[in-house]
Image (cartoon, rainbow, N blue to C red):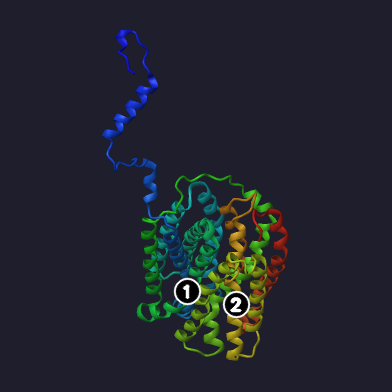
Amino acid sequence: MLVDSLSGATLDRSLISRKCSMCMSWFRPANTTTPPVIGDLSKRKISSIPVRIFATCFTSAIVAVNYTNYSPLIATMRAELHISSGQTGLLSTLLFLGLAATYIPAGMIADRFGARPVLLSSTTLFTCAAIALPLFPNLTWILFCRLLVGLGSGGAFIAGAGIAASLGKHASLGQGLYGGATQIGSGMGLLVTPHLLTLFGWRGSFLAWGIFSALAILLWLFVYDGSTAHQAHTIDVKAGLRSPSVWTLGLSHLGTFGLGNAIAAWLTVYLATAYHLPLILAATFGSFALLTGMFFRPLGGILIARGIMRAIPLLRMGTIMGFLGVSILMIPLHTPLLAITGIALIAIGATIPYTAVFNPAAHLRTVSKGVAQGMVSVLSSPTVIIGPPLIGFLLDRTDSFSWAFSPILLFGLVAIIASFLAQAALQKEATIMF
């Protein structure tokens, strides 16, 4: 029983507390919910897994268009700019030199500040450079703009690969789709550019692709990478340089991604010259080979995710197929069966091991994800930096693709050896089994 305090009686505090709680409940509306914390508002941003996958894949395709969009323009540019085949090969060299230069810095910045700022700034850079490239028909200006396109593309690619590797249980599928989108972009660069050439000339073709690239900027203005509170990681480039896993994965990628893109740069010219096909038809056949990669790169991710095949055996298979494919194209007997077989082997070998390279690189104990993936990409670059102009130089001197493609075999051989050394390195360094 409650007694007035003026009477000197002691209050029963526990009873008062219960009574007050009951009274408060009478005035609380039945449908009242706890108001959202201000920080929870970030969860309302567009950052679902399907949206992130679509955004990264679209950016990957836009980046990869620049890998091949100059290939159907080689003959026209040689005639109008009075340059050699070796000089046209520099369009690939400067592009991939720019990519190689930004892979590691972009990975470090993404590790420190998150992937989205890197993607926004990088897509802006390569879009502006792609639009500026055709403004002056001068080889020096064109190569400078290609270098800028490469710098932006490298940052966008490595940041996108980081987002694809951060999808939890969907990481293998995300990496596969991301890699498949790269093949779509490369294929579209070959397939669409001849038609643009017919309509607008070689300068208008570059300008059209540059304007189209602006869509990637608009996309990343509204899409977020899914990180609610980004945590900075320890960044140690020396750890990457000391890592056998990084070196073996990167040198293996030399004979998959690197080999495939070096051959793709000259695939249209090869088909047009060796089989006397019209330019548009040669580019169409070449693009179909690249477009098959949009199935094989995701397939590699699916095979790994479902445990059907492990990463390193898949990587070994890809390096061997690429080596065999180039060997077949070097055979001087120009029969359709040989061409189809060689191109198919290169297309599959260059694409199906993509997830087998980047997922292990993202799961190393002593190397952060961005640095590891960046260094792997850098190590795969010599084939596409040196290969295309070297192919053009040898083609001018020998007039034979048998000799022109021969240096690419050396890169393929190095990749095969590295793929067989990768398993032992990953057993010591990886956080999960591959």
Instruction: Assign the N terminus to one quadrant of the image.
Output: top left
217 is higher (above) or lower (below) than 236: below
Along the horizontal axis of the image, is 214 left or right of 368? left
Along the horizontal axis of the image, is 218 left or right of 138? left
Amino acid type at image mark 1: Tyr
Residue linked to disc 1: 70
- Percent coordinates x, y for residue 113 in the rendering: 48, 47
Q: CA distance from mark 1 to mark 2?
A: 20 Å
Amino acid type at image mark 2: Ile
Q: Residue at x 46, y 45 (%)?
A: 229
Using the rendered view, name the quadrant where residue 359 is placed.
bottom right
| Residue 135 seen in this snapshot | no
50 is higher (above) or lower (below) than 115: below
Q: Residue at x 58, y 61 (%)?
A: 358
Q: Residue at x 67, y 69 (%)?
A: 313
- Percent coordinates x, y for residue 166 in the rendering: 52, 55
Residue linked to disc 2: 346
Instruction: Assign the C terminus to one quadrant of the image.
Output: bottom right
Q: Residue at x 51, y 70 (%)?
A: 180
Q: Residues within 10 Å of mark 2 (few under 14, many from 20)?
A: many
Along the horizontal axis of the image, is 413 left or right of 64? right
Residue nearest the viewer, comparing 27 with 143: 27
- Percent coordinates x, y for residue 188 in the rendering: 45, 75
